[in-house]
Image (cartoon, helix red, strand yellow):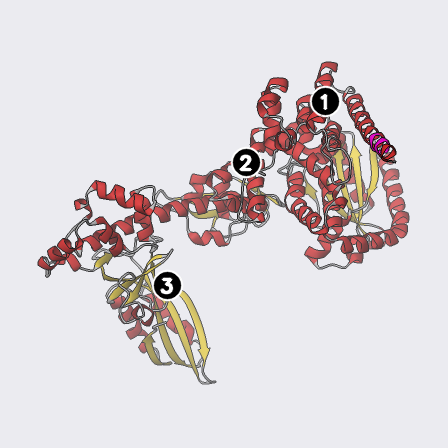
Amino acid sequence: MVETATTAKTTATSTSLDNTRFLARDLCSYLETYLDSDQVAEVYRAYLLGAEAHDGQMRLSGDPYIIHPLAVAKTMAEMRLDHKSIVAAILHDVMEDTHISKERIVTEFGEDVAELVDGVSKLTHLKFSSKAEAQAENFRKMMLAITRDLRVILIKLADRLHNMRTLGVMRADKSRRIARETLDIYAPIAQRLGMNAIRRELEMLGFAAHYPMRYRILQEAVKKSRGHRKEVMQKIETAICARMEEASIEARITGREKHLYSIYRKMQEKRLSFAEVFDVYAIRIVAGDVDACYRALGVVHNLYKPVPGRFKDYIAIPKANGYQSLHTVLFGPHGIPIEVQIRTQEMDQVAESGIAAHWLYKTGDRQSGTAQARAREWLKSVLEIQQAAGNSMEFLESVKVDLFPEEVYIFTPQGEIMELPRGATAVDFAYAVHSDVGNTCVAAKIDRRLAPLSTRLESGRTVEIVTAPGARPNPAWLNFVVTGKARTAIRHYLKNLQLSEAISLGQRLLDKALNNVGSSLADVDPQRWVLILSELELKDQETLLADIGLGNRMAALVARRLLLDWEQDEAASAETEGDDANAPLAVKGTEGMVLSFARCCYPIPGDAIVGVMSAGRGLVVHRENCGNALENRHKPDKWIPLQWHPETQPEYNAAIRVQTANKRGVLANLAAVISDLGSNIENVSFDERDGHVSTITFTVSVRDRKHLADMMRRMRHVPEVLRINRSRG
């Protein structure tokens, strides 16, 4: 009995290996249709090494593991990629899952193949605090590998495609997580690189695994609707074919059915019912050349009336991924909308294969070259984002924004066209031109008219950016920019700016703490610095000063540790009592991001002020009698005596509360007074006590207490004003 079982097991193993050999032979036969025999032989050598390395390893489906890399290689072969890509596809898991080293791959197949395999390998040897962080770091490594060689992403997409095709053997929770990752990252990357055939399959498989119930319900609904649609589509196709023959235009005309995930997303995004989405008929016309495409457009516009505003010419202005086609929407029979795409055969191939068309068409045709060049431009911008991003999560967040590019096309003053995602602003445009332009932009001209930097751009506009040498990014820009490049560049600049300002403030605070005990930074022994930095495990003096400036460490405690003989310094401090050792720290208001003014009391020059250290924010300036500040009076680590520097910044915010009779025009009269005194209204709020009296709170910009007092005196003369006082927040 045991012998029979062993025999059966041996037979099963033998059958599996036979199947594997058949797949390998099948792959080689296909490769012989476009590769040289010596290149095919190298692919077969790679298969033999892969089969040896993965010997004994099984997939969850029960198949020998080698089945997976062969399936990945088959997908690559269908894209007609070069033999090194096929070899790398077969070996893409050997470095990670087997004893085969990178050095051996270099020896047997060359540096190119080894780098491709290394680029595709996963980060299983690193530890992360969360799955999200692991995914983000894995994504970051993949994107960096892609920037070195585009073929890495083709192998990665083929790998993910086969894994999605065999996802059914996974646990439900794991399959949903993989499906979510596919929909969030891999399908958008395929779309961004113009690989629509792979993108559609990834979306369908991801949709089915992540939302199985929704997928089944939608699938049934499509089946029920298909019968009537078939008749209508045939009628539309026949009518278009007849008109094309009359115009002597040779073209291939096919009806297209929207795939389920596309229908689902449109229902979600536009809050539509299934009938409203599925009532759109799609036709694709593949013509002989570009001239025939435009003539075919005229034919269909004569046959059915076009829907205004729905025509897009992606032949004249291709999409960012190289996609080219004419798009139009027509009023069909009985008012049924018909979506029509018109393109050449080459454009159709690029639309389906994207950057893979570069290897399929090696004759240097313009379309495939465009897809390749545009993919490289995007990947170059991805590399810039990576260099400036703080961590993997921030990098993933920035790049995911760029993976959904519904473009707008903007003209530079020189007439060049720039592509930006829909919703992009003038600041996004500035950073797209160059990071230095973005960092120093102060205004924008749209069609020669000044416009706010937050203005959302529309296709066809000419945009000019006005820069100033001393300008710098505003943190508020992060509220409206949409491109990953702009967001990352602003964050990077502000981080560096905050660090330098924190160091400067920390140095002043520490020097003041040392002055209080009769010493100074200049008097500190350099060896003492080395010892303190070692004790605190900090890399340099600037890191310690930045911590003090950001409120993460107490200046007084650091001063104590820097001084060798605290008692002696206290005695020296007593001897200097009466001098300026305990003088308050002077502030100008121009210290930047690590010094801020409290909104609870709005301090302005002329007010008695104090500072409260806040962890992570730095020094917050309050009026001396502010309740929030007084809470910290007995906390010497937080309470910092301050005074105004003789040279302060030009304007500060102050709040004024005005009780007025509830009459027409009172707000306009008060606003006029504020304007006449050269001030600006930053904010205004209303509180109606009853039908006769209202309370208006203005936040206005002022130079100092005298400027504020003059404003309040003038406002008292407005007849409707009953009472006025400075608001304390």
Q: Is residue 711 magenta?
A: no
Instruction: Answer left or right for 557 relative to 44.
Output: left
Residue 625 is drawn in which quadrant? bottom left
User: Tag 1 or tag 2, which sits nearer the N-term?
Assistant: 1
Label 3 to label 1, Cα distance in Å? 77 Å
Numbered tag placed on residue 48 in the rendering = 1
- Magenta span: predominant SS is helix
At 41% from the left edge and 45% from the top edge, which residue is drawn? 493
* Relative image position of residue 685 (x, y in whole percent): 44, 72
Image position of 610 (left or right of 682): left
Q: Amino acid at mark 3?
A: Asn
Q: Dot 2 corresponds to which residue?
A: 416
Q: Which mark is residue 680?
A: 3
**Range drawn in magenta:** 6-10
Q: Are marks 3 and 1 in contact (CB under 8 Å)?
A: no
- Quadrant where the C terminus sits is bottom left
Residue 704 percent coordinates (x, y)? 26, 64
